[in-house]
Image (cartoon, grey):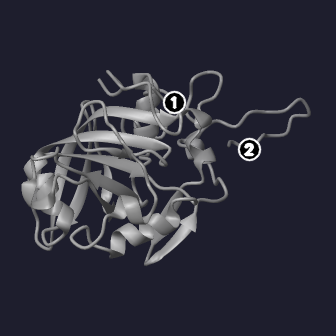
Amino acid sequence: RLAEGCAEQRAPAGRRIQEEAARAILYGCDQPHDDGIGGQYGKTELAGRQYALSASGGDGELPARGGKPNIITVAWAGTICSDPAMLSISVRKNRYSYDIIKETKEFVVNLTTKQLCRATDYCGVRSGRDVDKFQEMHLTPQPSEKVKAPGIAESPVNIECRVTQVLELGTHDMFLAEVVAVRVDDDYMDEKGRFDLNAADLVTYSHGEYFLLGKKLGSFGYSVKKQKHSKNGRKKKAK
């Protein structure tokens, strides 16, 4: 289950979340639906963004690396399956984190925000062979519930993953992974227990530049939604 066994303690505050909320984070909608035009869950919240990915073996598990956790910034990531919940990341073989992920078969995806933008960039241009990125960027390793790799406490969403398959593609290998737990920051949970992802100041990445997500252009399925009529007979625009 997506949120099964998620820990209560977190810094900053966090909570285990219901499976429906976890699916909303991964797939971009509140409830499952099958509208015949975009698949069961419609759009994905993981496409077109950049993530700070933390990977680690336990102490002594990776003696050559001291068992220390590392962070790698990944732009090529996305949701690949709804049941079981799965996602993919693509990593170059010469990256420091590549061997860690391949040996431990686990990692944590941490969504990045405006406040984490500089750290996200730094973790993408500096190697864990040379620096401790958690220390340099003053980030807090957050113990995970289902995997040994820590999350990043300052991130609003931590998605714990276990690798199920590695596809050798060329310059990059693609790691296919099942989502085993999701934790979110309490600050973005509303009174109905729903997670307001858009309030987290998420960052997107395009052609070497970072952008804060901006104006809403529509919601999933708005292009085919029937227009409602107001009391004066005029049509209301679908949102």
| Amino acid type for the residue under numbered disc 2 | Lys
Please say if 38 is above or below 48: above
Q: Quadrant of the rendered structure where residue 23 is?
A: top left
What is the secondary structure assignment of the residue under circle 2? loop
Q: Quadrant of the rendered structure where residue 129 is?
A: bottom left
Numbered label attached to residue 237? 2
Q: Position of residue 234 (x, y in %)?
A: 85, 39
Judge whether residue 98 can be spotted in this image: yes
The quadrant in which the C terminus is found is top right
Nearer to us in this view, 234 or 154: 154
Nearer to us in this view, 201 or 71: 71
Q: Position of residue 143 (x, y in %)?
A: 33, 38
Other residues around mark 2 within 10 Å, as few (<14) / some (14–19) / many (≥20): few
Taking the image as shown, residue 66 lies to the left or right of residue 228, namely: left
Residue drawn where x is 39% and y is 61% of the image: 135
Residue drawn where x is 61% and y is 36% of the image: 187
Closer to viewer: mark 2 or mark 1: 1
Numbered label attached to residue 100? none
Other residues around mark 1 within 10 Å, as few (<14) / some (14–19) / many (≥20): some
Residue underneath mark 1: 30
| Amino acid type for the residue under numbered disc 1 | Asp
Please say if 236 is above or below 55: above
